């Protein structure tokens, strides 16, 4: 492989948190997602001789050797080159990410967004949001099976959004600072499997699951109002109700429930899993930045792999 001393282009994307509404959003209920700028993916493009190569923590080699699980990345790169009318060859693509994989923090969507942005920048083009979403959707179809689209909307947004499938995301107002603590259980969750398991429950017991999905939808709507009013105590209670519904849907597990219990005992205003569940991360609302540190320590004490303290300032 001979590297040519030529132009380099960079594209990036941040992670995301689903505040409320995961799983129900697949069934057209509204959900709230928040950009999570503490974790990021950066894609760097450079010209080389030969075929397209990828260098990352999880894969090194030519694009055609990407394993089945990562085929979404190959599809995204190749379809972006087709959209740009450029040859599917002669590129070195480096991926660097601080978004842990499979934790419900948007890693697959952020990788795809960073790739599309970097390729457009490399060829001097500007990608429109609709094009970006269409290309990233191809990668997400592979990663998730039946994605609602909330991940790619959230990782490409600079503000919190109310998301509903098939509609343009609505930017949200926040009436007071929101202090969040995110804890990584250290266990990889399989969103594809979790979404499939909810579908199976739905088929077995449609009335019961439908009712649970409806309640999550109402909780998401009330959470929007609580956020806008800056009533974080109410928001916390709503997140706790949402967690009960996620248990009902079968996507929480013992380890996640334990982290949530610890957060509540340490005074969290509310706590729930975030993302697909069955592993992955939980989020908790703290009453202040100082309280965030208390919650983070409580999580670490019971074995969380890592935590992030994150405050969203009030914005109108
Ligand atoms: O990618 P995750 O694990 O954050 O899950 C996305 C949210 C789900 O509602 C579970 C799936 C979807 O496509 O909306």
Image: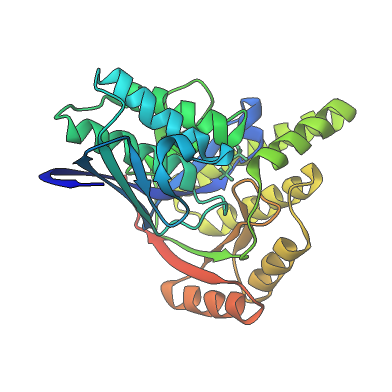
Vertical comparison of 127 with 257: above or below? above
Among the 4 quarters of the image, the one containing residue 51: top left
Q: Tell me the quadrant of ligand 1.
A: top right
Q: How are the residues colored?
A: rainbow
Indicate left or right for 7 with 313 as reference. left
Residue plotted at (51% across, 57% down): 232
Q: Nearer the viewer, residue 119 or 159?
A: 119
Tell me the quadrant of the picture where the C terminus can be found.
Answer: top left
Q: Position of residue 264 (x, y in %)?
A: 66, 69
Q: Nearer the viewer, residue 27 or 77?
A: 77
Answer yes or no: is residue 148 visible: no
Q: Position of residue 93 (x, y in %)?
A: 30, 44
Vertical comparison of 240 with 276: above or below? below
Q: Nearer the viewer, residue 54 or 199?
A: 54
Indicate left or right for 151 with 283 as reference. left
Vertical comparison of 242 with 65: above or below? below
Vertical comparison of 229 with 304: above or below? above
Indicate left or right for 131 with 184 as reference. left
Residue plotted at (57% across, 64% down): 184
Residue plotted at (62% across, 28% down): 146
Q: Position of residue 244 (x, y in %)?
A: 75, 51
Residue plotted at (85% across, 33% down): 208
- Badge count: 0
Answer yes or no: is residue 43 visible: yes
């Amino acid at each position: 492989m001979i590297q040519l001393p030529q132009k380099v282009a960079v594209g990036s994307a941040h992670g995301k948190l689903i505040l409320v509404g995961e799983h129900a959003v697949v069934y057209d209920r509204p959900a709230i997602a928040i950009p999570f700028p503490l974790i990021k993916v950066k894609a760097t493009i450079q010209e080389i001789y030969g075929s397209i190569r990828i260098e990352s923590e999880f894969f090194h080699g030519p694009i055609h050797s990407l394993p089945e699980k990562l085929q979404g990345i190959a599809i995204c790169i190749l379809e972006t080159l087709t959209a740009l009318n450029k040859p599917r060859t002669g590129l070195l693509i480096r991926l660097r990410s601080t978004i842990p994989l499979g934790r419900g923090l948007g890693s697959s969507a952020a990788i795809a967004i960073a790739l599309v942005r970097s390729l457009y920048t490399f060829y001097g083009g500007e990608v429109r949001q609709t094009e970006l979403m269409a290309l990233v959707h191809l990668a997400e179809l592979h990663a998730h099976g039946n994605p609602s689209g909330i991940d790619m909307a959230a990782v490409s947004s600079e503000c919190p959004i109310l998301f509903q499938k098939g509609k343009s995301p609505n930017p949200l107002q926040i009436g007071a600072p929101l202090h969040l603590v995110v804890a990584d259980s250290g266990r990889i969750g399989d969103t594809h499997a979790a979404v499939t398991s909810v579908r199976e429950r739905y088929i077995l017991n449609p009335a019961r699951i439908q009712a649970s999905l409806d309640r999550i939808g109402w909780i998401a709507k009330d959470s929007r109002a609580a956020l806008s009013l800056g009533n974080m105590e109410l928001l916390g209670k709503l997140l706790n109700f949402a967690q009960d519904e996620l248990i009902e849907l079968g996507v929480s597990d013992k380890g996640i429930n334990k982290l949530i219990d610890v957060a509540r005992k340490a005074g969290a205003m509310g706590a729930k899993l975030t993302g697909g569940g069955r592993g992955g991360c939980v989020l908790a609302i703290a009453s202040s930045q100082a309280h965030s540190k208390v919650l983070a320590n409580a999580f670490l004490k019971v074995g969380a792999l890592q935590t992030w303290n994150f405050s969203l300032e009030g914005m109108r």
